[in-house]
Image (cartoon, grey):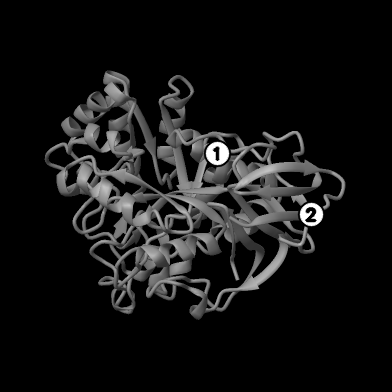
Amino acid sequence: MANYLLKDVHLIDPNSKFHDQVVSILIEAGSITKISNTSIEVDEQTDVIEAAGLHVSPGWVDSHVQLSDPGFEYKESLEALSQAALKGGFTTLLAYPNTSPVIDNAHMIDSLKQRTQGLEINVQLAGSITHGAAGKELAEMYDMHQHGALAFTDGSHPLQHAGLVQRALLYTQSFDGLLIQYPTDQNLTKGGQMHEGEISSKLGMKGIPAIAESMGAVRDLHLQQYVGGRIHFHPITTTEALVSIDNVNVERGAVSMGTNICYLAHHDEDLWEYDTHFKLSPPLRTQVEIDALIGAIKEGKIKVLASGHHAQGIEEKKLQFEQAETGILGLQTAFSIAYQTLVATGHISLTRLVELICHEPRKLLGLPAATVEEGGSAELSLFSPNGEWKLAAKQIPSRAKNSPYIGQTLKAKVFGIIQKGKFHSAN
């Protein structure tokens, strides 16, 4: 392992005694051996990392990433996913199980863990709640937990059967397992293409009503109150669901919620030109919902932000809007879009943003707390809040190019990560 000196970096870590200070950090053999407000002398074998306005924080965690490998490697391989993560400043991902075959057994967990060992970043796995994510029979969640699964979700196929949700909540209590559920009543969403409202009416598109999300949330909340267990609702996109969950969240810490960054930065009016890059599931909502979500973040009710990264091939996106698949590439641009939307506008501080993409998801998933301190492991994200950059299609590692930000100049630039004893540049 190489040794590194992060010279005169602005540390953002509310858990560190050096928080919000300019310090130099010495990293040797993957561990932080010295932090100082003054200069640190090093030998010629130590790589010095410095840049104007460079900031550092504990490594970021993306808790909502759709894995495409195995089964959909033509969209994005594991290696490409890892590259996209480090370019976006993330050191750890939670990969959703909607692969082919679905991650619904301990063998799949073991196989993928072995394949991810050599990647630049940490890939944690979510197992499927039901066999094949088909919503019919519970999978062996305890076995997957024993082999390293951190959470359980059917991901893009949220559970519709109340009895299954009840049994899953009961089953996971024996090992304090976490269910992640996007709440929706699919009986109300069939054939829907975008948020039901003024824009869908003007475009002549069948809408997806907000009530579908709130009805799903209320049902699952009643079940959780009845039998207990831990459930995290993600991504939340509507005011009604937000209010319903928050009312229970005050009383029961076993209930939490998060959302994806794209739902804070875009609304249904972005679909005027039928841009399939903005066709998502759940759909983009209205400015009213955005304001409510941002308010919930400011009040600490939404505790986790994620990218919702979902690679789709060119073939899946270059279709008429009704036929196009849902999904957006989010890893490389997540920090920039979050910074532009939340920090640059004065809604939250940079420190709070780091909590939302670092400390809070670690708590949710039961990962070790991350603090920049002497003797600690060097899992770090490096970035420049005042930096600017432009996303080019050739900079996207995966074969998929379903990002609406290609060609755009974005604020807040990721410099790289330090992970597994190495510095990985985002450039």
Question: Which is in the foreground here, disc 2 or disc 1?
Answer: 2
Q: Does residue 181 lie above or below 306 as drawn?
A: above
Residue 287 visible in image: yes
Residue 333 visible in image: no
Residue at the (76%, 64%) spot, across then down: 51
Q: Does residue 195 lie above or below 361 as drawn?
A: below
Q: Secondary structure under badge 1? A: helix
Quarter of the image that includes the N terminus: bottom right
Q: Residue furthest left?
A: 136
Q: 202 left or right of 9?
A: left
Answer few, some or many: residues within 10 Å of disc 1's Cα (few below 14, many 20 plus, some between 14 and 19). Answer: some
Q: Does residue 373 lie above or below 133 as drawn?
A: above
Residue 122 pos. (x, y %)? 45, 50
The picture quadrant where one finds residue 167 is top left
Residue 20 pos. (x, y %)? 77, 43
Q: Which residue is mark 1?
A: 296
Residue at the (56%, 74%) spot, across then down: 391
Residue 187 pos. (x, y %)? 20, 47
Residue at the (55%, 49%) spot, across then down: 60
Q: Name the residue nearer the viewer: 414 or 391.
A: 414
Quarter of the image that includes the C terminus: bottom right
Q: Name the residue nearer the viewer: 418 or 93.
A: 418
Q: 399 left or right of 405?
A: left
Residue at the (27%, 46%) spot, across then down: 109
Residue 34 pos. (x, y %)? 74, 42
Inspect the image, locate mark 1, and give the three-letter code of the amino acid beneath it: Ala
Q: Secondary structure under badge 2? A: loop
Q: Which residue is mark 2?
A: 42
Disc with the residue nearer the chain's start (2 vs 1): 2
Inspect the image, locate mark 2, and give the three-letter code of the amino acid beneath it: Val
